Amino acid sequence: MMRKILDKAKDESQKLTAGEKTLYKLHIWIKAQDRDSIIALDHHGKINKQKLKAQAGVNPRAVQSQNPVAAKLMRRMERHWRSLGLLSPLATVKTKPQISSTNTDSNSDSKEPEYQDPRDAEIARLQAELSKVKALNYQKDIQLARYKEWQEVFYREGFFK
């Protein structure tokens, strides 16, 4: 796959798709990396995608989800560089400890739920409602603009005199 894209990039008469351009840029960027530049990109065992964007000109989402081939290539390179010791080991995901349901009556150290101000919940509810109303208002503004455009067309074409 990569060989085909590289051959297509060398042939100036053929255009590359956006996904192929991403793979081509990523391939060139990977080839140009040295030990110090890889270590500088390390972010908890993975490549810092914002620095990748700045250096390679590749959209960070393309190497995460949008372009599956680019994401696979990036994961493979991260594993390879981690095995060489250029990237730190992956950070472990912190999980919440499980509380067993046995002896809940005898557990005197259990924390009481934190006090939550009912005003905070009301504010959050109102903010959510406000954002929905703003979105609806925006849609109505778009519809109004369309109606005004059609009205101008009808008057210009002589439907209404």
Image (tube, grey):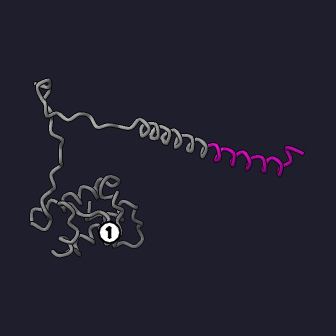
Q: Position of residue 132 (x, y in %)?
A: 53, 40
What's the residue at 15%, 35% (across, down)?
98
Q: Nearer the viewer, residue 132 or 105?
A: 105
Q: In this view, does 61 lie above or below 21?
A: above
Q: In this view, does 22 lie above or below 118?
A: below
Q: Give x and y (percent) for residue 64.
A: 30, 55
Instruction: Please state if 60 lies on the left or on the right of 44 as rendered.
Output: right
Q: Residue at x 42, y 37 (%)?
A: 121
Predominant secondary structure, magenta span:
helix
Would residue 102 be counted in the magenta stretch? no
- At a point 57% along the width and 44% down the height, the residue shown is 134
Amino acid under label 1? Lys
In the figure, residue 10 lies in which quadrant? Answer: bottom left
Q: In which quarter of the image is the N terminus?
A: bottom left
The residue lying toward the viewer, choosing from 103 and 145, is 103
Quarter of the image with the C terminus in it: top right
Asked whether, in this view, residue 97 is left or right of residue 72, the answer is left
Q: What element carries label 1?
A: helix
150 in relation to 76, above or below: above
Q: Measuring from the top left, give residue 31's x and y in whole percent.
A: 22, 72
Looking at the image, residue 93 sits to the left or right of residue 62; the answer is left
**Residue at 35% across / 37% down in the picture?**
116
Neighbourhood count class around disc 1 (C-alpha, 10 Å): few under 14, some 14–19, many 20 upward: some
Magenta segment, which residues? 140-161
Relative vertical location of residue 98 with respect to residue 66 in this rendering, above or below: above
Residue 158 lies in magenta, yes or no?
A: yes
Q: Mark 1 points at which residue?
A: 25
